[in-house]
Amino acid sequence: MADDPSLRLAGSARDLAVFAERAARHDPGTPVRLVAADGVVAAFATTPFDCLGLRVTRLAEDAAVDMVVEAVGLAARARGERDGVLALPPRLPDITWSTPLPPRSGWAEVARLPVSAVVGRVGSDTAEFKRRAGQGSPGSGVPAALEAVAADLWARPLVADAPARLAHASEYLGFLVDDDEVVVRAAGPWRRLDATGGVVLARVLDPLGLLVG
């Protein structure tokens, strides 16, 4: 495989560029794993919320790619896309990516929530964080004691056993973009929140605090 492969997209790379730019806000070196197969390229990005963000882009030509790149580099290449050809940035060592990928199938719907309720939950959690911590905001590189407060809020249920960190990651990546609803789904130890702007995914813990799966 070439060091710097390219992908031919079915449409514009604008949404992918926006996704990569948002993923790079916390750290320009944030890794993004690109997996191209079956006529689409799935871009998975890590977030400060122990969730993965996912943006899927249709391809004009099928390709087989599985590589890790820097979010800031992907954003620049996506902004520079011409005539549907996306030249991918240099790949990072595979060891840069240590997070398991979620399953492609087997997802069952858990609940549907109004976007306004999800946005409201993020707002109420942020307000509680500020009350408890006295400063800062979740996910902004705060000291360990404040990170513990944020982690406690993110671990609380959004609905059923889907953690609130899904809501925070979705808001962070700009996925909560309209007044429609989001769908929460489950597959094994994974939970996901599907919004108009994209998908966020997280693995949950069992009651003993051990990772399931």
Image (tube, helix red, strand yellow):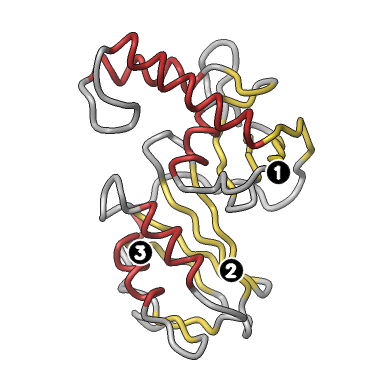
Q: Amino acid at mark 2?
A: Thr
Which residue does the image show at 45% across and 81% down from the upper left?
A: 86
Q: Which residue is mark 2?
A: 57
Q: Splitting the image into 4 quarters, where does residue 186 fall?
A: top right
Label located before the other in sequence (3 or 2): 2
Residue 124: x and y, percent? 49, 19
Which residue does the image show at 66% across and 75% down from the upper left?
A: 39
Is 203 rendered above or below residue 173?
Answer: above
Label located before the other in sequence (2 or 1): 2
Q: Which residue is mark 1?
A: 180
Contact (Cβ within 8 Å) of mark 2 with mark 1:
no
Residue 20: x and y, percent? 40, 60
- Per the model, the C-alpha gap separating discs 3 and 2 is 16 Å
In-front residue for pair 50/197 = 197
Using residue 205 as the reference point, say whether residue 134 is left or right of it.
Answer: left
In-front residue for pair 153/190 = 153
Q: Which residue is mark 3?
A: 69
Using residue 188 as the reference point, say whether residue 200 is left or right of it.
Answer: left
- At mark 1, the secondary structure is loop
Between circles 3 and 2, the one closer to the viewer is 2
Is 81 rendered above or below residue 179?
Answer: below
Local packing at callout 2 (Cα closer than 10 Å; few below 14, some 14-19, many 20+) is: some
In-front residue for pair 191/19 = 19
Residue 168: x and y, percent? 48, 33
Label located before the other in sequence (3 or 1): 3
Residue at the bottom extreme, as displayed: 83
Between circles 2 and 1, the one closer to the viewer is 1
Between circles 3 and 1, the one closer to the viewer is 1
